[in-house]
Image (cartoon, coloured by chain):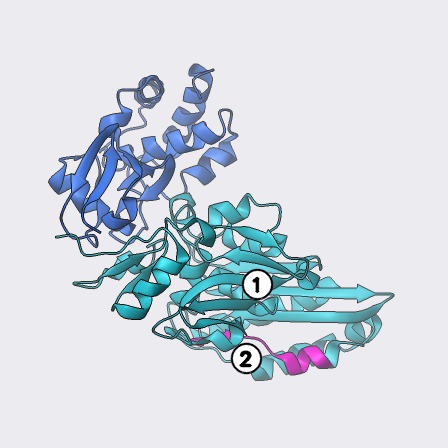
Chain colours: A blue, B cyan
Amino acid sequence: MDVITFTLNGKEVVYDGSAADRLLEVLRDTYDMKSVKCGCKEGECGACAVLLDGLLVNSCCVAVGAVDGSKVMTVEGFRETPQFAVLSAAFADLSAVQCGFCIPGMVLAAQAVLSQNPHPTEDEVREGLSGNLCRCTGYNAIINAVLNASKEGEGLW
Amino acid sequence: MVNGYAPKTLQEALEIRAHEKVIPYAGGTDLMVQNPKNAIYLFLNKIDELKEIKDDGEYIRIGAGVTFTQAIASDLVPQLMKEAVSRIAAPAIRNAGTFGGNLGNSSDKADSVLVEFAMDGCVRLVSVNGERVIPVEEFFIKRRENNLRDDELIAEILLPKAKCSMPYYYKKVGGRNALAISRIAFAGTYLVKDGVIEDISAAVIGGAAKFQRFKDIEKMLIGKTVGELKANIDEYVKLYSEKYIFTRGRVSAEYRRTVCMNLTKDFLNTII
């Protein structure tokens, strides 16, 4: 590989470091995407989740060389969308955010659920968010926020 | 300094594999937990021919680059495999993790590999010098040890269609529902016709650094009537009990034995 080229939040970027570097660290350190959190570095917590070609992945478990030619979206890009506005309002309304560390991953996991299934059941939301750990909220507020967003954002997904 | 390889075709990948010291990278979900220093990866995730699921009449062929998410959505992948891989980790891991990676990584807790053991699955291995198809149970030696040669790549997993359509049994016991590594997992298929057991196979994940399947007991059961199994079920459970090996890991060997024997009996009761 000569260079690694990928689309980050709609803009093409060219990375010339090691192809083995973790996407998590490349996003945070090279591209200043600080919404992407480092929780466990072993795919167990979802704090570093991003959308890779529209699918939720844990960026700690992705080598940057694997995203050559792909589209990566973090909350820095997603927050410009109407879907984010609905999710953000729903999370705020239900106090679904406490410390906030897990929230970028949760919001992208919610987007992944709703983009595949605009009217999920509670069980489907729980399944979709099952890889994202939260130590503060006890999950129920987050699950309810996603269900509310599904109603409030009718037609967006 | 970019130091990896991202071939677009399998042939290109095999050339690199034959001539360079590279680590095959499929989904990255296990590999990147360690991410060994100075690793040079051969990225296989953009090779379309490794992402196909096909039915050749005799086998369901699952490309090494097929992700678990892709398999769950497929009409071709047997229900037993879907059930097992749908309980791997969580969506973000299933979106990236692949069949080739799960087998190549050779964890003795690999949930898709358990099903391959239970279903007489085979693996197609390819290199610039040709290919070979061998049973998964021959490919997998034990935890972290397999028969992949230095110039080979895993191309496909082959599941015999005869097994794919049989009734099945699957139970996974982990510490929680999501993001759970199997403490015990049990996969089995069976076929009963006119009250006679025509086929049966079962394999377990049990912490013995390998998958355990006992074909000699299966042979004893084939040809027996359901009534005979029912009358002697405790004897058959005992036969399994004498063969299983359990080791201590995250849970005790005793815990594993108790759970596994319960599942073995439950499986045999399902056939009755």
Q: Locate residue B100 relative to residue B232 in the image: left or right.
A: left
Q: Amino acid at mark 2?
A: Tyr
Give percent across and percent down for residue B42: 29, 59
Residue at 53% of width from left, 59% of height from top? B172
Residues tagged by mark 2 and mark 1 found on one chain of the structure:
yes
Label 2 is found on which chain of the structure? Answer: B
Give percent across and percent down for residue A28: 16, 40
Q: Amino acid at mark 1?
A: Leu
Whether B211 is among the magenta residues is yes
Whether residue B124 is situated above or below residue B47 in the rendered picture: below
Camera-side residue of B151 and A61: B151
Name which quarter of the figure residue A106 lies in: top left
Q: Which residues are magenta?
A: B208-219
Camera-side residue of B86 and B121: B121
Q: Locate residue B113 relative to residue A66 in the image: left or right.
A: right
Give percent across and percent down for residue A93: 33, 18
**Mark 2 neighbour class, 10 Å CA radius: few under 14, some 14 to 19, many 20 or more:** some
Whether residue B250 is situated above or below residue A97 in the rendered picture: below
Mark 2 falls on what kind of element?
loop
Label 1 is found on which chain of the structure? Answer: B
Residue at 23% of width from left, 37% of height from top? A101
Mark 2 vs 1: CB contact within 8 A: no
The residue that disc 1 covers is B158
What whole-number distance in Å separates the C-alpha atoms at marks 2 and 1? 26 Å
Q: How many marks?
A: 2
Q: Locate residue B44 relative to residue A41 in the image: left or right.
A: right
Which of disc 1 and disc 2 is earlier in sequence?
A: 1
Mark 1 falls on what kind of element?
strand
The residue that disc 2 covers is B244
